[in-house]
Image (tube, helix red, strand yellow):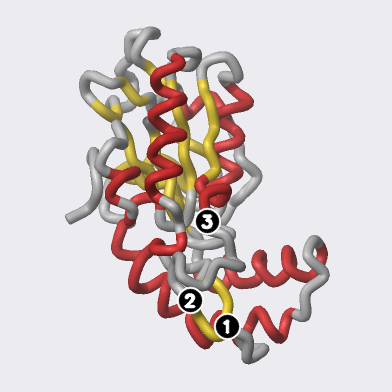
Amino acid sequence: MLAIAGGTASGKSILAKALALHRPGAVVLIHLDDFYVPAHEPHRGARAVSATGAETLDWNHPRSIDQDAAAAALQAAATRGQHRMTVVELLFALSLPKIADHATWRIYVHTPDDIRLARKLMRKIEVQHQDPLVSLRNYLLSGRERHAEYVAPTGPKGRVLGAGSRVDAGTCFAASWGPAPVGRRCPARLALPIGEVGDLGNEDMTIFVLGRGRPA
């Protein structure tokens, strides 16, 4: 399993989808966004007061993810044995013990905070048609703090795999020895050649390869 974490709008989904599209028969993609507890159930997950004054699910808190359901989905994917690799992505994928502790590989996608915030606002305006002022206030109320507490500490501390959105073409992942040095070939049965996905169209993104399991 490959777990991908990083801040909101950092490029996690871009990388995860590129891997899945590059090896459609070998990679299954699981978005942990699908495992938030229901927002209308006030006794589950973490709660926060929005800039609108309403109490809501805290979307930036790891306790708002149903870890048991997510872990069950990962186990089911592994049990079916239809794919060589399961890729999971979420901003705090590496903060969730039932996910990170079982990851064979871990990646943290880093993008400058101002770029991430600008992308998020554009998404809120263009896709969700939300008032950007509400998003900005929510960011200042809790979003920035949650990122500093639950996301940023999970990286970046590892080896830089790619910068400027283009992954090192000589790098691959092998189950037996982790990230291989440039120029070293991985056995095909063990390798996930990240570099072959090419340019991800995200020049502000830096990809960090971390060690196995959850950061201490």
Mark found first going from the N terminus, 3 or 1? 3
Callout 3 secondary element:
loop
Is residue 102 left or right of 86 when viewed as pictured?
left
Image quadrant assignment for residue 197: top right
Q: Horizontal and vertical percent for residue 62?
A: 40, 62
Q: Which residue is drawn at 48% across and 16% down?
A: 83
Mark found first going from the N terminus, 3 or 2? 3
Callout 2 secondary element:
strand
* Residue type of the residue flagged with mark 1: Glu
Say if mark 2 contacts mark 1, CB within 8 Å.
yes
Q: Disc 3 marks which residue? A: 36
From the viewer's side, name the closer residue of 171 and 36: 36
From the viewer's side, name the closer residue of 186 and 93: 93
Q: Horizontal and vertical percent for residue 12?
A: 53, 48
Q: Residue at x 26, y 54 (%)?
A: 157
In the rendered image, the vertical position of residue 204 relative to residue 184, given as above or below: below
* Residue type of the residue flagged with mark 3: Tyr
Is residue 202 left or right of 179 when viewed as pictured?
right
| Mark 2 to mark 1 CA distance (whole Å) | 7 Å
Image quadrant assignment for residue 104: top left
Q: Disc 1 marks which residue? A: 55
- Can the viewer see residue 164? no
From the viewer's side, name the closer residue of 98 and 38: 38
In the rendered image, the vertical position of residue 124 relative to residue 54, given as above or below: above
Is residue 194 left or right of 211 when viewed as pictured?
right
Residue 47 is labelled as 2
Q: Residue at x 31, y 21 (%)?
A: 174
